[in-house]
Amino acid sequence: MSSASDTDRLLAEQLLRLTRRLHRIQKRHMEPLGITPAQSRLLRLVSHYEGGQAPRMADLAARLEVVPRAVTTLVDGLEAAGCVRRAPDPANRRVIRIELTDTGRATLRRLRNARTDAAEEILAPLTGDQREVLGGLLNALSDAPADVPAERRC
């Protein structure tokens, strides 16, 4: 009989393998768009930024949990592709905000389709009932408070 720690190790390995597979498949579906996964994440963040105004580079770095230089590199690539533009803040011209362009919005639509195609590829072996069970399990994992010790979760 397998111990709980053996089961947890096996589940951790399975989750890691699935995550890697999902990233590979998503990357393959996104390659024709010329957008990297990191650029895709930045585009989504800019499009959903709260507060109604375009984010500053520092805001993006904080939300992505990366150094500002990494955001600069991502923005440079997306700006060259016409997906975003740098715009001075009207209240403080020294502050630069990142705005989504029409091309960026169209790219986001194509990226959503690519992510959906990748998910369909991953989920293809599952029946509808299995997908519902998996969805419930994934919700339970994603909604669990991060600060609750594992032995207290039930």
Image (tube, rainbow, N blue to C red):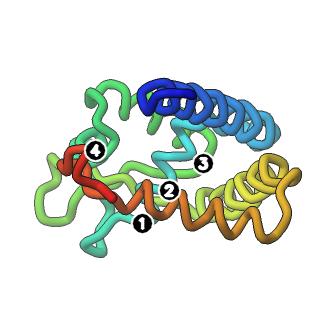
Q: Estimate the spatial distance between the alpha carbons at disc 3 and disc 1, rounded to whole Å.
A: 18 Å
Residue 45 percent across, percent down from the top left: 42, 55
Q: Nearer the viewer, mark 3 or mark 2?
A: 2
What residue did someone put label 3 on? 82
Q: Estimate the spatial distance between the alpha carbons at disc 1 and disc 4, rounded to whole Å.
A: 32 Å
Disc 1 marks a residue whose amino acid type is His
What residue did someone put label 2 on? 44
Disc 3 marks a residue whose amino acid type is Gly
Dot 3 or dot 1, earlier in sequence:
1
Q: Secondary structure at mark 3?
A: loop
- The residue most toward the bottom is 52
What residue sits 22% from the left and 42% below the top?
58
Query: Which image quadrant: the N terminus?
Result: top right
Q: Secondary structure at mark 1?
A: loop
Q: Secondary structure at mark 2?
A: helix
Q: Nearer the viewer, mark 1 or mark 4?
A: 4
Q: Estimate the spatial distance between the alpha carbons at disc 4 and disc 2, rounded to whole Å.
A: 32 Å
Q: Secondary structure at mark 4?
A: helix
Label 2: how many residues lie within 10 Å, few (<14), some (14-19) or many (20+)? some
What residue sits 68% from the left and 70% below the top?
132
Label 1: how many residues lie within 10 Å, few (<14), some (14-19) or many (20+)? few
Residue 72 percent across, percent down from the top left: 37, 31
| Left or right side of 32 for 132 | left
Q: Nearer the viewer, residue 25 or 46?
A: 25
Q: Quadrant of residue 81?
A: top right
What residue did someone put label 4 on? 150
Q: Are marks 2 and 1 in contact (CB under 8 Å)?
A: yes
Q: Nearer the viewer, mark 4 or mark 2?
A: 4
